[in-house]
Image (spheres, grey):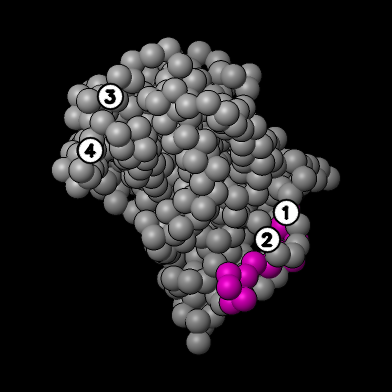
Amino acid sequence: MSAPYLEIKGLKKTYNLKPILRGIDIVLDQGKCMALLGANGAGKTTLLRILACLTKPVAGTAGIGGLDIGQDVQQVRLLVGFVGHQPNLYDELTGLENLLFFGRMYAVKNARERAVTLLQQVGLARRSNERVGTLSRGQLQRLSLARALLHSPRLLLLDEPDAGLDDEGIELLEALIREHTGQGGTTLFSTHNFERAVKYSDQICMLSGGRVVYHQVSNDLEAGSVRLAYEEALR
Amino acid sequence: MTFLSQIQAILWKDIRCELRSKQTWMSMGLFALLVLVIFNFAFDLRVDNKAAIAPGALWVAFVFASLLGLGRTITSEQEKGSMDRLMLCPVDRKAIYLAKLLGNILFISVVEIIALPIFAALFAVPLFTGELLPIVLLGTIGIATIGTLFSAIAAATQARELLLPLLVFPLIVPVVIGAVRATGALMASSVNEPPWLGMMLAFDVIFLSVSLLTFEYVIED
C-alpha cells in the first residue's frame, strides 16, 4: 500500500490566542480529490494557507508528497498550486505578462508556450494582452486557475474556486479538476456548494470550529445527505 | 532559476507596474518639489547662511518623498494580495528584499534627478559636482535599505502610514546627518570635517546586512 500524498496530523493554528484549527487529521491519496465544507470561520482557508506554506501551524505536522511543510518549504512550494479567495494578480500587467512572470518565478520551461496553452484552456486567449485590471471577476478567477496550474503542481489547493464563476466557468473548473486528478494530481478544494462538492470530489470533509466533524467517501453520497450531515454538524 | 534572475524578474515586474500606474513616482516627485518650494519661501536665504540651510532642506525633501514611495513598496502588494502570491513562489526571500530595495533605490533616484536641478535653481547653489554623486547614492541606499525592511513590518499592521515614519526616521538619522553634513561641506569648503562618506558607507553596510538577515522573518507569517 502506497503512502498517502497528503497527510495532516494534529494540525493546530491560533490567531491572537484564538484557536482557528484545533487538531486536524486528514489523509488524501494521490490522484484523489477532497472537498472541504464548512461555515464561514470553520478554518477551511487557514488549513489551505498552511498547506500552501503561507502561514505556519502552532502544532501538528503536514506532509505533501513525502515532504514536510515545515522543513522542506521551498520543495513543497514547487508541488503546490494555490487559488485563494482573491485573484492576487498584478492589475498593471496583462494576463500573459502575469503568467510569464510567475513562470519565471517557478522556473517553468517553455513558459510562454505553457502560458499561451493555459490561457486558451481557460478561455482567455483573446484577452491575454489586456491588462488584468480590465478583466471581470470571473475572468480573473479563470486567470488565477491558469496561474495555479502554470508550473504543473502535483497538489492543487483551491479556496472557493467557484466564487464569481459563471456556468461556463464552473464547467471549465470541473474539467480542470478532472484533468488534474486524471493525470495523477491531488486536489483539495473548499466550497459552500454541496452539489459541486459531491460532483467533483472523491471525499468530503467537513470542518466546524476548527475540527473535522464529518469525513466521508463521496462516490455513494448525494448532495441532500451531505447537506443534512452539514446541518447536523453545525447544531 | 538563479538568485540573480529571481531579483531581475521581480525588479522588472515592479518597474513595469510602476511605469504603467505612475502612482509612486508622480507622488514622490511632486512631494519633493513642493517641499523644496516651501522651504525656499520659508527661509530667509542669504549668502552667509545658504550652506547651513540648503543641505538640510534638500535632504528633508528627499527623506519625506522617499517615505511616500517606501510606504507603497510592500503595502501595495499586500493590499492587492499579490504579496501572498509572491510568497507562494519557491523564491529566496533575500531575492525579494533585494529586488524591492533596488526598485526603491531606482524610484528615489529618479525623483532626486528631477529635484536636484530645481533645488540648485531655487536655492542658487552650485551642486553639480562629481562629489555630490557618492553622497546622494550612499544617502539613498541608506534610506531605501531601512525603508524597504520597515515597509514590510508596517504593511502587516493597521496603522501602517503612521508606523512607517515612526520606525524609519530614528534609524536613518545617522545617514541623514552624514548626507546633510557632507552636502554642506561641498557648498562651503570647510576643513576638519569627519569622513562623512565613510560613515555613511559603514551604516549602509550594517543596515543592508541586518536587513538581509531579518527580512525573511519579517515577511513570513
Q: Is residue B190 magenta?
A: no
Residue on which disc 4 sits:
B45
Tell me the SS state at disc 4: loop
Q: Which mark is residue B125?
A: 3
- Amino acid type at image mark 2: Pro
Q: Earlier in the sequence, mark 4 or mark 3?
A: 4
The magenta segment is A7-19
Camera-near label (2 vs 1) is 2
- Given contact means CB atoms under 8 Å apart, are the residues at marks 2 and 1 in contact? yes
The one of A101 and A135 positioned closer to us in this rendering: A101
Which residue is farthest right?
Answer: A1
- Amino acid type at image mark 4: Leu
Mark 4 belongs to chain? B
Residue occupying image coordinates x 27% and y 44%:
A138
Residue on which disc 1 sits:
A62
Count residues near mark 4 (Cα–Cα under 10 Å), then give few for <14, some for 14-19, many for 20+.
some
Same subunit under labels 1 and 4? no
Relative to residue A52, is residue B40 drawn left or right?
Answer: left
Q: Earlier in the sequence, mark 2 or mark 1?
A: 2
Mark 3 belongs to chain? B
Q: Position of residue A217 (x, y in %)?
A: 61, 60
Residue occupying image coordinates x 16% and y 43%:
B41
Residue on which disc 2 sits:
A57
Q: Position of residue A141 (x, y in %)?
A: 34, 43
- Amino acid type at image mark 1: Ala
The one of A105 and A146 positioned closer to us in this rendering: A105
Distance of label 2 from label 3 (alpha carbons): 58 Å
Tell me the SS state at disc 1: strand
Residue A17 is at least partly visible in this image: yes
Tell me the SS state at disc 2: loop
- Given contact means CB atoms under 8 Å apart, are the residues at marks 4 and 3 in contact? no
Distance of label 3 from label 1 (alpha carbons): 64 Å
